[in-house]
Amino acid sequence: MPLDPRAVHIYTDGSCYRNPGGSSGCAAIVQYPEHLGRSDEQIVDFGCSESSNNRMELLACIQALNWIRTVLGSEPPLIQAGTSMKSFAYRDSTAEL
């Protein structure tokens, strides 16, 4: 399915060198439609000395959703539905948060 050329597209990625426990980072890029005349913008740029691939992938998505909330001034229905679900904490194999 082709992407909608009139929509704002957000691309996220996270990684970890020597997973888990190594240097890690995540990023997100927003790509605006051509008709808005805006250039691509990096909205997430984060790194830390110790984490995992999964945490960085999730952090990139969470930060991108927070950016959407900030830009729109409210939560779109998709975010409202996701945040109304029962919260859970991500734990690694050692049961640490």
Image (tube, rainbow, N blue to C red):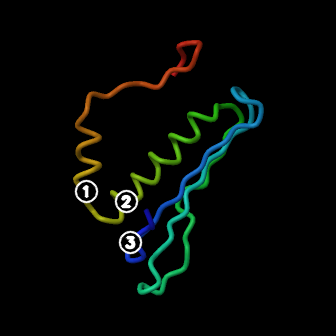
Residue under the image location 55 percent in, 57 percent down: 28
Answer with left or right where residue 86 lies relative to residue 7: left
Residue 76, disc: 1
Residue 7, disc: 3
Q: Quadrant of residue 62?
A: top left
Q: Amino acid at mark 1?
A: Pro
Q: Quadrant of residue 56?
A: top right
Marks 3 and 1, the one that precedes in the sequence: 3
Task: Verify CB contact (< 8 Å) between mark 1 and mark 2.
Answer: yes
Real-space CA distance between mark 3 and mark 1, rounded to the nearest whole angstrom: 14 Å
As drawn, which residue projects farthest toward the top? 94
Residue under the image location 28 percent in, 40 percent down: 83
Q: Amino acid at mark 3?
A: Ala
Real-space CA distance between mark 2 and mark 3, rounded to the nearest whole angstrom: 13 Å
Above-or-below relation of 71 to 52? below
Q: Nearer the viewer, mark 2 or mark 3?
A: 3
Marks 1 and 2, the one that precedes in the sequence: 2
Q: Amino acid at mark 2?
A: Ile
Identify the residue under disc 2: 68
Task: Verify CB contact (< 8 Å) between mark 3 and mark 1.
Answer: no
* SS category of the residue bearing label 2: helix
Real-space CA distance between mark 1 and mark 2, rounded to the nearest whole angstrom: 8 Å
* SS category of the residue bearing label 3: loop
Q: Residue 50 at what x, y percent from top left?
A: 69, 31
* SS category of the residue bearing label 1: loop
Q: Residue 76 at what x, y percent from top left?
A: 25, 56
